Amino acid sequence: MMAVRITKDPIYANLGPGRRIDIGLIDPGAVDFRLMAATLAKQVRFDGRHDGPYGISAAQHAVQGAQAIVNEIRDLRLAGLFLLRDGHQLFIGGRSRPAEDLLKAKSGTNLDEIVRNIKQAWDLAIYEAAGMQTPDCWTRATREALDLMDVRMTRAEAITLFGRQAEADFPKATTPKTTGALHPWPAAKAELAFVEFFQRATGRSI
């Protein structure tokens, strides 16, 4: 895809040392997967509302969910798609579902639609940059499989961090067959695991 502008004026953000990009210009060439790994490894899920020095990062969620897909159904292609599911957070950050629900309740559906459109735009660029099938070409079965693993992982993570009280926030679901126990990783571990799984799924070095 060619670069596509989604804002009237440029919106600049620092992206790694010595690099500043316009995040209102959707461009596959702006996607840096090693920096994505480092960024998502520092973005803690559930807004960091838990005890202890570490949280479960977006990178850990992506890696362990991808590993679970491979362990359960041996589908490396689908696992690679799951790995990059939250890749747009490199550019726009992330919020927990309760926080998003609160904003939606106060602002109506317009904000939700705007955020969804921005995520979708960056997702197209990210998957194209990775050489993967872009979301606009996914089947319904692919979307449902990715959504289900996301819910299963989120449920299991919430129970790990907050205890059984968190079960009330999710539908009943089987615990994903992750590689290793589900507990918070240090950022460095999550970053390295993300890079390694990306290279495994794409066959590309970064």
Image (cartoon, grey):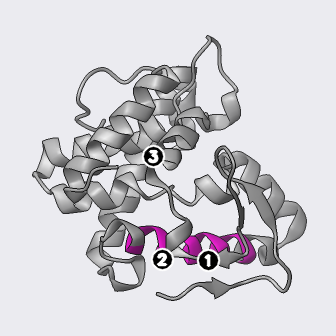
Please identify the dominant SS of the magenta region: helix
On screen, residue 76 versus residue 12, left or right, reads left
Magenta stretch contains residue 25: no
Spot occupied by residue 64 in the image (x, y as percentages of width and height): 33, 37
Residue at mark 2 to residue at mark 1: CA–CA distance: 9 Å
Which residue appears at 82% of the width and 76% of the height? Answer: 10
Which residue is the extreme one toward the front? Answer: 18
Q: Place residue 129 in its image quadrant.
A: bottom left
Task: List the residue tagged with mark 1.
Answer: 26
Q: How far apart are labels 3 and 2 at the CA level?
A: 18 Å
Tag 1's secondary structure?
strand
Q: Residue at x 74, y 76 (%)?
A: 114
Task: Residue type at mark 2: give it.
Answer: Leu
Residue placed under numbered mark 3 in the picture: 34
Q: Which residues are magenta?
A: 114-128
**Residue underneath mark 2:** 124
Q: Position of residue 187 (x, y in %)?
A: 51, 25
Q: For the point 35% across and 51% down, which residue is it?
A: 149
Does dot 2 land on a helix, a strand or a loop? helix
Q: Position of residue 32 (x, y in %)?
A: 50, 56
The amino acid type of the residue labelled 1 equals: Ile
Question: Which of label 3 and label 2 is nearer to you?
Answer: 3
**First reached walking from the N terminus: tag 1 or tag 3:** 1
* Kind of residue sitting beneath label 3: Arg
Q: Which is nearer the N-term, disc 2 or disc 1?
A: 1
